[in-house]
Image (cartoon, rainbow, N blue to C red):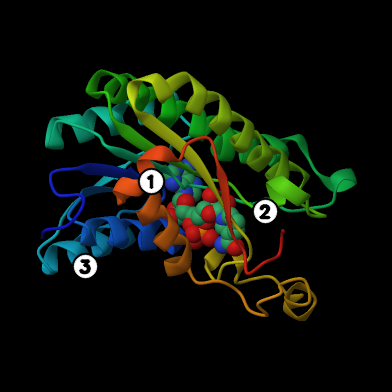
């Protein structure tokens, strides 16, 4: 496959489905070799790898719970052993454990912080060494509009996603001198497994000027631009929304 990302390598965390899968397909279509990271069962990840390789792309599936330091280190080591470099990291893996503050148990708080915030720190720190040495790299952190505007029932999630934004800006400043860009993408309501069980769809749609949920491919379009487009080399430390106009 030929494209803007020929000879480049991208890791997308949590990429066996949803936004991560759409991002992996988009980067593979640009010619990147992609690492499909999954936490537990390999079945869906293997299917994404097959979808990419069947059309001439390059992909491998690697297991790692990215909230765990030793597993993140193994993910990066496995990628380097297979491909020898890392050009793009998409910190996409995320979970929700929604409930109102007064009912929120410490384990629901901690699980969301551990993956959605600490996982971003662990993966970014692990690839930073490699990208700084290469003097190039693009890191894209998936935040959320919940991190910008808050959302009842999501104290844990919105705190983690707001944390990702502060983290993005600091790391962008730390890594800019070596040509590494770090940006955040903040999706609104996107049609994936994460939103499939929301019951108040009618209510939600009232707050979306474009009047519909977004598609994973629409978030992946921005990720592809930030990861692959030469023009994105001059964009760093930014938060970009893909939210149908929800936050403006
Ligand atoms: P999803 O639930 O479909 O996908 C999440 C992925 O993360 C899954 O592949 C899952 O296996 C993986 N994952 C879970 N725990 C993991 C772990 N410990 N280690 C590695 N991978 C793990 O959700 P999605 O909607 O595709 O969400 C992707 C990202 O986008 C998340 O960070 C989410 O918070 C964010 N986001 C989603 C929406 C939305 O409306 N869907 C809105 C804003 C932000």
Image point 36% across, 29% down: which residue?
180
Residue closer to the observer: 147 or 194: 147
Residue closer to the observer: 52 or 42: 52
Specify whether 137 is left or right of 106.
Answer: left
Mark 3 or mark 1, earlier in chain? 3
Which one is in front in this view, the residue at disc 2 or the one at disc 1?
A: 1
Q: Look at the numbered disc 2 and say if its residue's Cβ is closer than 8 Å to ligand 1.
A: yes
Q: Which residue is tagged 3?
A: 51
Q: Position of residue 200 (x, y in %)?
A: 77, 75
Query: How packed is label 2: few (under 14 Cα within 10 Å), some, or many (20 or more)?
Result: many
Element on which disc 1 rests: helix
Q: Position of residue 45 (x, y in %)?
A: 30, 57
Q: Which residue is tagged 2?
A: 145
Q: Look at the numbered disc 3 and say if its residue's Cβ is closer than 8 Å to ligand 1.
A: no
Quarter that holds the N terminus? bottom left
Query: How packed is label 3: few (under 14 Cα within 10 Å), some, or many (20 or more)?
Result: some
Number of numbered tags placed on the structure image: 3
Compared with 153, 212 (above or below) is below
Structural distance between the alpha carbons of marks 3 and 2: 31 Å
Image point 23% across, 24% down: which residue?
134
- Per the rendering, the mark at residue 232 is 1
**Residue 112 falls in image quadrant:** top right
**Residue 127 falls in image quadrant:** top left
Specify whether 106 is left or right of 136.
Answer: right
Element on which disc 2 rests: loop
- Per the rendering, the mark at residue 197 is none
Which one is in front in this view, the residue at disc 3 or the one at disc 1?
A: 1
Q: Position of residue 151 (x, y in %)?
A: 78, 54
Structural distance between the alpha carbons of marks 3 and 1: 27 Å
Compared with 209, 166 (above or below) is above
Compared with 142, 159 (above or below) is above
Structural distance between the alpha carbons of marks 2 and 1: 22 Å
């Amino acid at each position: 496959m030929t494209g803007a990302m020929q000879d480049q390598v991208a890791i997308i965390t949590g990429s066996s489905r949803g936004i991560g899968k759409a991002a992996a397909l988009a980067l593979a279509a640009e010619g990147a070799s992609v690492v499909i990271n999954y936490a537990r069962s390999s079945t869906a990840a293997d299917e994404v790898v097959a979808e990419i390789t069947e059309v001439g792309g390059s992909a491998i599936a690697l297991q790692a719970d990215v909230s765990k330091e030793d597993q993140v280190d193994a993910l990066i080591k496995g990628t380097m052993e297979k491909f020898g470099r890392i050009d793009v990291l998409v910190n996409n893996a995320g979970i929700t454990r929604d409930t109102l503050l007064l009912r929120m148990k410490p384990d629901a708080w901690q699980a969301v912080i551990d993956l959605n915030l600490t996982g971003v720190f662990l993966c970014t720190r692990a690839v930073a060494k490699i990208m700084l040495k290469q003097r190039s790299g693009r890191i894209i952190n998936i935040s959320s509009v919940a991190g910008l505007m808050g959302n009842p029932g999501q104290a844990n999630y919105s705190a983690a996603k707001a944390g990702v934004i502060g983290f993005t800006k600091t790391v962008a400043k730390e890594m800019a001198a070596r040509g590494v860009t770090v940006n955040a993408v903040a999706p609104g309501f996107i049609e994936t497994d994460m939103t499939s069980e929301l019951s108040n769809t009618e209510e939600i749609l009232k707050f979306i000027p474009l009047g519909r949920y977004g598609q994973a491919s629409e978030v992946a379009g921005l990720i592809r631009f930030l990861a692959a487009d030469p023009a994105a080399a001059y964009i760093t430390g930014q938060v970009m929304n893909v939210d149908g106009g929800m936050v403006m």
